[in-house]
Image: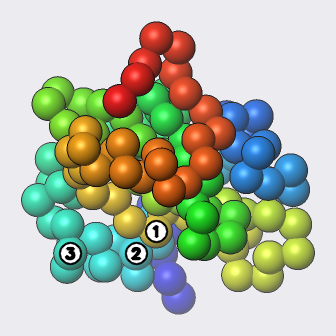
Amino acid sequence: MEENINIGKIDIDKFKEISTEIITDEVVLTSERLEHILERHKEDLDMYFNKIEEIIRKPDYILKDSKNINTAMVIKHIEDTNVNVIIRLAVANDSIHCKNSIMTLYRIRDKNLKKLMQKNETVFTKMNKSP
């Protein structure tokens, strides 16, 4: 059985433009996704694991992933970089995801953040913040 790490909670209102059918505010990281992040973004995970809860609770930007349904890019500027936490939202009639689930996380430079914002709809921006 897959183990889940409870990460924290999202403010569902900030994600309403992605889906109005979100069934929970809880966010988890599954062991399978943890393994994925460790394989591909270990350094980022080591540096920002203790910041994930803050990132999802107080993001600077939330983008609607244009390639994946019910998926959000939750981005926060930390120190001299940005951390992007991809979350698959748990919505009604989704038999796989009963909680919002972190798919991956990684650092992105400002230049890449601007590109992401051009290609994906911004559904939330923190006040007084621009990339």
Q: Looking at the picture, which amino acid does disc 3 mark? A: Arg
Using the numbered discs, state the Cα–Cα distance from disc 3 to disc 2 in whole angstroms: 11 Å
Label located before the other in sequence (3 or 2): 2
Q: For residue 40, which numbered disc appears in the image?
A: 3
Examine the image and state in which quarter residue 32 appears.
Answer: bottom left
- Say above or below: 49 vs 90: above
User: Which residue is more in the foreground, 62 or 67?
Assistant: 67
Residue 49 showing in the rendered view? no
Secondary structure under tag 2 reads helix
Q: For residue 33, which numbered disc appears in the image?
A: 2
Instruction: Confirm or deny contact between disc 1 and disc 3 (CB under 8 A).
Output: no
Mark 1 nearby-residue class (10 Å; few <14, some 14–19, many ≥20): many
In this rendering, position of residue 49 left or right of residue 101: left
Q: Looking at the picture, which amino acid does disc 1 mark? A: Met
**Which residue is identified by label 1?**
103
Q: Comparing marks 1 and 2, which lies closer to the viewer?
A: 1
Instruction: Confirm or deny contact between disc 3 and disc 2 (CB under 8 A).
Output: no
Residue 123 on image: x %, y %: 65, 39
Mark 2 nearby-residue class (10 Å; few <14, some 14–19, many ≥20): some
**Quadrant in which the C terminus appears:** top left
List the single residue furthest toward the top.
128
- Say above or below: 131 vs 114: above
